[in-house]
Image: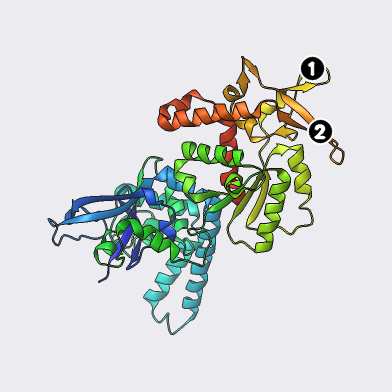
Amino acid sequence: MGSYCELYISKFPIATTKNEVDPFLLSVFQPEDLVEFDRKVGDRFKLLYGRDDEAEETERAIQYVSTAKNLKDRLNVIGFTMNRVEEAFENSKEESVERLKEWLADPNFNSSESMTNRLNTELELLNNSSLSDFLEASKEIIENEYGFSPDEKTPISKNPVVNYLLEERYGLDKFPYDYDQRTLLRAILELAKPDEKVTYDITELVEAGYYEDEPESVYDEVIEAVTYDYEIGDKFLILTEGSSDIQILKNSLELLYPHLAGYYSFMDFGISNASGSASSLVASIKSFVGADIRNKIIALFDNDTAAESAIRGLSKTRIPENIRIVQYPPFDFLEDYPTIGPTGITTMNINGLAGSIEMYLGEDTLTDKQKLIPIQWKGFDSALKKYQGEIVDKATVQKKFDKRIKACKSNPELMQNYDWTGIDQILKMIFEVFNK
């Protein structure tokens, strides 16, 4: 008979696997999503499977649980956007169409009028249905908790796509999703409310002894067993110009997007004793290129003149697809910022000239004695014909932000008292780097 693990949105089964945990589905959860509790066997989700035997027996439930919003964010980060879902849907549907045509043309397979009619009906349905049609049908199935195969003579719904999806009694497995069930999950999450629970229940497999270690070790055992897809297990590696950038980004990510923090790893210049500067970051990129590292790498440069100049040094280096080079994004707040010039304090647009990470830490952090801390011009780049600027008291800004981080970690309710606009813009850019 075998043992199953199942993925549920609310209490509706979206996908099932037999005798193994699907590492791809597990990868959208994190170890901290593990939940263990005692329950009666009869209390299992059982829309598709009765499982009434020994219903009063108690078992230890092993689940990974998160919210629809968190999983949608995670899937977007690793590239499972709705654009990718649309592409996978069309590819999978086209494969099914071609297969049906081959069966119709094969007299050894298509040997009766009823079979011909059935194949033609399915072919017509696929040719005339879009992703939105399948999502609409899935919504009807989930909302009405349809759980079993409809009778051909008395279809369960007026919508033929609904009946098609339920033909084989395995949830939504006939939904065209091009093999990777993360595609199916991402599609169905479009129908879920942000706070709706998504559960991956692996109780049966652990109970049956497929994994001998403690439940806490199952995650690493499953993920590490996969070596052929860098989207499983391997984190995005982030490189920056200096250790202060690393600490600011890491702490901000953990506060603003804790459910995504596990997908990123930071190269800390302070720990490695590497010097922090745009030129050092260029040297690191060249080293990674030469080493043929497979991880997805995001190299983050400041939004300033020194960074632009340094990036030009990579113009003759062939950058592989797994390395993305970006600067901190233009920021509206920096379009009219005070600078110290020959004639005193003047305001100007410092995007591209002096946009270090400190400039994204919020107006409250950048204000001292009720005035914004100004930019001091340091030098002129003759090739770019642009000045390089730097905030006057960088250390004070960093200390103020560090104090803010510590306060918010101790009491998350304080987060609403601070301006996170700039740092949030950087993080959102990071999340989308590999989707462009």
Viewer-closest of 149 and 160: 149
Looking at the image, residue 113 sits to the left or right of residue 149; the answer is right
Q: Earlier in the sequence, mark 1 or mark 2?
A: 1
Viewer-closest of 230 and 251: 251
Q: Residue 304, how many percent across, how many down? A: 73, 37
- Residue 79 in view, yes or no: no
- Mark 1 residue crowding within 10 angstroms, few (<14) / some (14–19) / many (20+): few
Mark number displayed over residue 23: none
Q: Residue 341, how many percent across, how many down? A: 80, 22
Residue placed under numbered mark 2 in the picture: 379
Q: Give the CA distance from mark 1 to mark 2.
A: 17 Å
Query: Mark 1 falls on what kind of element?
Result: strand
Q: Is residue 29 above or below residue 419?
A: below
Task: Give the residue displayed 86% in from the left and 41% down from the top.
Answer: 383
Quarter assignment of residue 57: bottom left
Judged from this view, the residue extending furthest toward the front is 273
Task: Give the residue displayed 30% in from the left and 49% down from the top.
Answer: 35
Kindly identify the amino acid type of the residue bearing the numbered disc 1: Gly
Q: Residue 54, how many percent across, how many down? A: 13, 61
Quarter assignment of residue 244: top right
Number of labelled discs? 2
Task: Give the residue displayed 65% in from the left and 63% down from the top.
Answer: 291
Viewer-closest of 317 and 135: 317
Residue placed under numbered mark 1 in the picture: 344
Kindly identify the amino acid type of the residue bearing the numbered disc 2: Gly
